[in-house]
Amino acid sequence: MLTKRIIPCLDVTQGRVVKGTSFAELRDAGDPAELAAFYYAEGADELVFLDIGATPEGRNTTVDIVERVSRQVFIPLAVGGGLRSIDDMRRMLEAGADKVTVNTAAVLTPELIKEGAHKFGSQCIVVAIDARRSGNSSEAKWQVCTHGGRRPTGIDVLSWARRAVDLGAGELLLTSWDADGHRAGYDLELTRAISEALVVPVIASGGAGNLEHLYQALVIGKADAVLAASIFHYRTYSIRQAKAYLAERGIPVRTEQ
C-alpha cells in the first residue's frame, strides 16, 4: 500500500515565510531555509515552496532562496509562484527543485503543462488549483482562482482538473480558498470530488487546524497527501506527532527518515 504524505508548505514573500487567512492577512512565520531544515529533520515527506508574491507582482520566483532551501533538504521539493515558461521551470529545477507547480500561467496558457511534461516528465509537473465555492445551488460547485487567489476566473474546477491531467499534469495541489487559514478543516467535498474523478495524486491543501483534519482529508477526502502550514509553522503540532496520530488510525505513513 502506498504511504500517505505529510507536506509542510512554505508560502514565501519578501524572503520570509508567511501565513494568512483566505490568502490575506499575512503573518510572519520564519526564515524559509531554517524552516526547511527543521521540517526535514522532523521527517516531512516532501516540501512545497510557493513564492506567493511573484505572480501578483509580475516577477519571477526568487532563485537564491530556492537554492538555499534545496541545500537543506533531501526530500522532494516542489517550487511554484511566477513560473510562466519552460525556461522558468528549468531554472527552478536547476536551482534544486524536484518538481514545479504552475497555477496562473497554466490557466492562461494550458499548453505550458503539455510542454513541461514533454520536456521534464509528468512527474515534475504539479498543477496547483486554487478553488473557490460559487453559486447558491444545493449542488456544490467551485471555480478556479488565479493570481494568488485574487482573481476568480469562472472556470469550473473539476473540468479544469481533468484538462490539466489530460495535458500531462502528474499531480494536483488542490487548495480551498474558502478554508485556507481558517483551521476548521479541509473542504472534504471538494477534495473527494477531485480525488475520485482523477487517477493522478491529489494533495489536499487549505484548512488544517488539528490532526483529525489531516485524517479526514486522507480518508473522507481520499487525498494522497495533505499539505499544511499554520499547524506546523507555529508548532501547534509536529510532523512526528502527525505521523504517529495517523499511524495509530491505520493510515500508512513513512516513519523513518
Image (tube, rainbow, N blue to C red):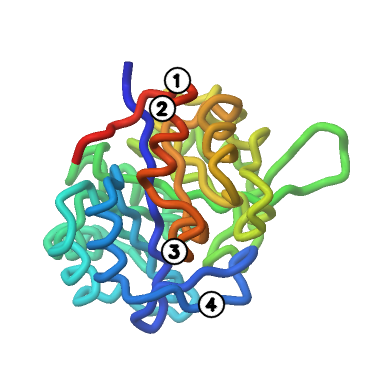
| Quadrant of the rendered image containing residue 153 | bottom right
Residue type at mark 3? His
Q: Secondary structure at mark 3?
A: helix
- The answer to whether 162 is drawn above or below residue 236 in the figure is above
**Image coordinates for residue 155, horizontal then vertical, percent:** 63, 48
Q: Report the front residue among 110 and 83.
A: 83
Point out the tag, 2 or 3, that comes first from the N-terminus. Answer: 3
**Left or right: where 23 falls relative to 114:** right
Residue type at mark 1? Gly
Residue at 43%, 24% in the rendered image: 251
Q: CA distance from mark 4 to mark 3?
A: 11 Å
Please tell me how crowded label 1 is: few (under 14), some (14-19), or many (20+) other residues with Cα within 10 Å: few
**Image coordinates for residue 85, horizontal then vertical, percent:** 29, 62
**Left or right: where 229 falls relative to 256:** right
Q: Which mark is residue 247?
A: 2
Q: Secondary structure at mark 2?
A: helix
Residue type at mark 4? Arg
Q: Which mark is residue 250?
A: 1
Q: CA distance from mark 2 to mark 3?
A: 22 Å
Q: CA distance from mark 4 to mark 1?
A: 35 Å
Q: Nearer the viewer, mark 4 or mark 2?
A: 2
Q: CA distance from mark 4 to mark 2?
A: 32 Å
> According to the image, label 3 marks what residue?
233
- The answer to whether 12 is drawn above or below residue 1 in the figure is below
Q: Report the front residue among 50 and 210.
A: 210
Q: Report the front residue among 46 and 170.
A: 46
